[in-house]
Amino acid sequence: MNESSPKDTIFSLLSTALDARSELLAGNQTNAIRLFAGFYEGFPGLAADLYDRTLVLFDYRDTLTSLDAWMDAVQQYYLASLPQIDCVIRKSRSSPDPLQKNGVLTYRDSPADQVSEFGIHYAVDLTLNRDASFYLDTRNLRKWLLENSSGSAVLNTFAYTGSLGVAALYGGAAAVVQTDLNKNFLALARTSSMLNHLDLGKMKLRPVDFFVEIGQLKKSGGLFDLVLIDPPFFSKTDKGRIDQQASAARLINKVRPLVKDGGRIVVVNNSLYLSGEEYMQTLTELCADGYLKLGEIIPVPEDVTGFRATTVDQPPVSPAPFNHPTKIVVLEVKRKG
């Protein structure tokens, strides 16, 4: 699909995608939904998300030739199709203007400030960052945490706005440590906890570099039942470097000493060009010593991956046995001694 295609073609794609999500839209599981996954559903560069009553349109193209010629029409399509939308934000990945990257209001001026999912309320700030402050691809992971965190001590690294840690706390975790370098991101975790009347005394927010925090935790001797690793694809500080494609095993080895015997590490790797087969090989090698064991794979929801009836394009490399380049796996830990 390219930008010179007739508008009725894009409207047909949007309509087909919306029909595929009718059950999700009519249900009560969540009001944070990907309405159109353009990379997979026939219009690369465009994604459309619904956060409660706010539509967020993403232009992911790598060039400054934006989708502006299409965006007005796409916006009008969704306003006509989904009457609950009362605000629209557009984000442009390639814009040199940070405000354009973080989002510009193009319809009314009061975006939603929270969403709900599996009975939990999450605070969002839809123009806080280039994304929308709440990751839709980890919905099933939040559900898993809701069901598997009771009584656990949880460490959520690269916590961002803390939705994973909030899900764990809501699910009955005894203690949750959320660490991220950016204190403004972490502030949303506190707001989310307050929305759900959770015990803030059970949650610590640590705006500290990952490598510093892991070092401090090792020195303190603290151990966790569950450690979450959901890092950015690539980042570098003066304390260390993260590269999910070239060094997928490194962060896992960093946190292994912090996990109790019988505990678990949940790893999220969103490297687009790291195949599922290659990643599984890395994990298999890590498990060769018998102190790690591959557990379950947590799939990405279909509204993010595209449905069988709507998927036109595939990722640049196969994510199999995962269903999306966002690869989520549970590792079971056995301690020495």
Image: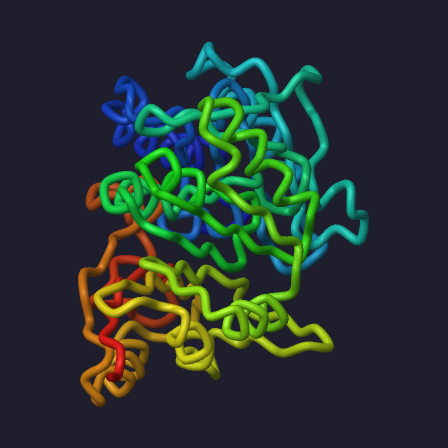
- Of residues 271 and 237, which is closer to you in this image? 237
Is residue 259 rendered to the left or right of residue 93?
A: left
- Of residues 296 and 277, which is closer to you in this image? 296
Q: Which of the 4 image quarters holds residue 123?
A: top right
Q: Is residue 62 visible?
A: yes
Is residue 88 rendered to the left or right of residue 98?
A: left
**Image coords of residue 323 (percent x, y):** 25, 58
Taking the view exactly as shown, the residue that stands out farthest to the top is 83
Q: Residue at x 44, y 25 (%)?
A: 121
User: Can you say whether 284 is above or below 300 in the image?
Assistant: below
Q: Residue at x 50, y 22 (%)?
A: 195
- Of residues 44 and 272, which is closer to you in this image? 272
How many numbered circles does the render carry?
0
Taking the view exactly as shown, the residue that stands out farthest to the right is 97
Q: Residue at x 72, y 55 (%)?
A: 64
**Image coords of residue 102 (percent x, y):** 70, 42
Q: Residue at x 28, y 79 (%)?
A: 283
Task: Check the image and tell me how it is coloured.
Answer: rainbow
Q: Which of the 4 image quarters holds residue 329?
A: bottom left
- Of residues 310 and 57, which is closer to you in this image? 57
User: Can you say whether 203 is above or below 218 in the image?
Assistant: above
Name the quarter where the C terminus is drawn: bottom left
Q: Is residue 314 visible?
A: no
**Image coords of residue 251 (percent x, y):** 46, 75
**Image coords of residue 26 (percent x, y):** 28, 17
